[in-house]
């Protein structure tokens, strides 16, 4: 067991981000078994779930004439438009069937407000609406967080950067993550994470 102040965050290991899903990440299912093996080593274990209403504003289907993977402006800044994914209560929003969720202490759902996307496990994409995860981790005495899951360049990246900015010591275990990698987004994410002191392991 790792020290009592260490948490693992398992980000969005859901059917829609795995092969066959609506926003499939290549190799997304390969990380499930090694994540199952790693999670029990941590005393604090948080899993996240992307969780959108069917008319979520991050969906291209809500923007007349816009294609998935194009960009739009939201009140809080630029936003990639996605295929419909992780709709509340759907099979696509469920955790991968082989992911052992019995080990989770807490499941955080995010992205449930129609108007705001939420890549990060800590703040929605306006960078100010909190999910409550910071308070949970602090009240459990957590000082270090390790991140694994999907996708490296979006939800893992945003969660890792927010964690570092909040003062946690952060490691992204890259071998247990997989990326969407659109238009150099993986390289940009790795640079952005390094810039705020996230260790890439
Ligand atoms: C994610 C795009 C849209 C992710 C979630 O989990 O990385 N990416 N929603
Ligand atoms: Zn999403």
Image (cartoon, grey):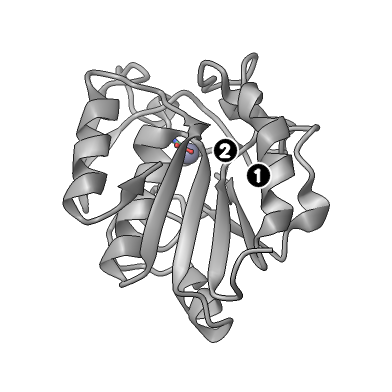
x and y percent of residue 55 in the render? 50, 39
Q: Where does label 2 land, which residue?
A: 54
Q: How many residues crowd mark 1 within 10 Å: few (<14), some (14–19), many (20+)?
A: some
Contact between marks 1 and 2 (CB within 8 A): the answer is: yes
Q: Tell which of 154 and 8 is nearer to you.
A: 8
Q: Tell which of 18 and 34 is nearer to you.
A: 34
Q: Nearer the viewer, mark 1 or mark 2?
A: 1
Asked where in the image residue 42 lies, by quadrant, the reply is bottom right
Element assignment for label 1: loop
x and y percent of residue 14 in the render? 64, 35
Q: Where does label 1 land, which residue?
A: 88
Does the residue tagged 1 have its C-beta within 8 Å of any atom of ligand 2?
no
Q: How many residues crowd mark 2 within 10 Å: few (<14), some (14–19), many (20+)?
A: some
Residue 89 seen from this side? no
Q: Which mark is drawn over residue 137?
A: none
Compute the Cα span from label 1 to label 2.
7 Å
């Amino acid at each position: 067991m790792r020290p009592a102040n260490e948490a693992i965050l398992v980000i969005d290991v859901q059917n829609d981000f795995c092969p066959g899903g609506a926003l499939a990440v290549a190799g997304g299912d390969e990380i499930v078994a090694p994540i199952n093996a790693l999670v029990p080593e941590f005393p604090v274990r948080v899993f996240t779930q992307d969780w959108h209403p069917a008319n979520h504003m991050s969906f291209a289907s809500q923007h007349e004439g816009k294609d998935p993977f194009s960009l739009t402006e939201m009140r809080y800044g630029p936003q990639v438009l996605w295929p419909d994914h992780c709709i509340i209560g759907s099979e696509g929003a469920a955790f991968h069937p082989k992911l052992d969720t019995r080990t989770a202490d807490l499941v955080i759902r995010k992205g449930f407000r129609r108007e705001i996307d939420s890549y990060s496990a800590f703040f929605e994409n306006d960078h100010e609406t909190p999910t409550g995860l910071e308070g949970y981790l602090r009240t459990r005495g957590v000082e270090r967080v390790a991140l694994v899951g999907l996708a490296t360049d979006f939800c893992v990246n945003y969660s890792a950067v927010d964690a570092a900015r909040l003062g946690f010591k952060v490691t992204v275990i890259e071998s247990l993550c997989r990326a969407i990698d659109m238009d150099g987004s993986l390289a940009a994410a790795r640079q952005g994470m390094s810039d705020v002191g996230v260790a890439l392991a």
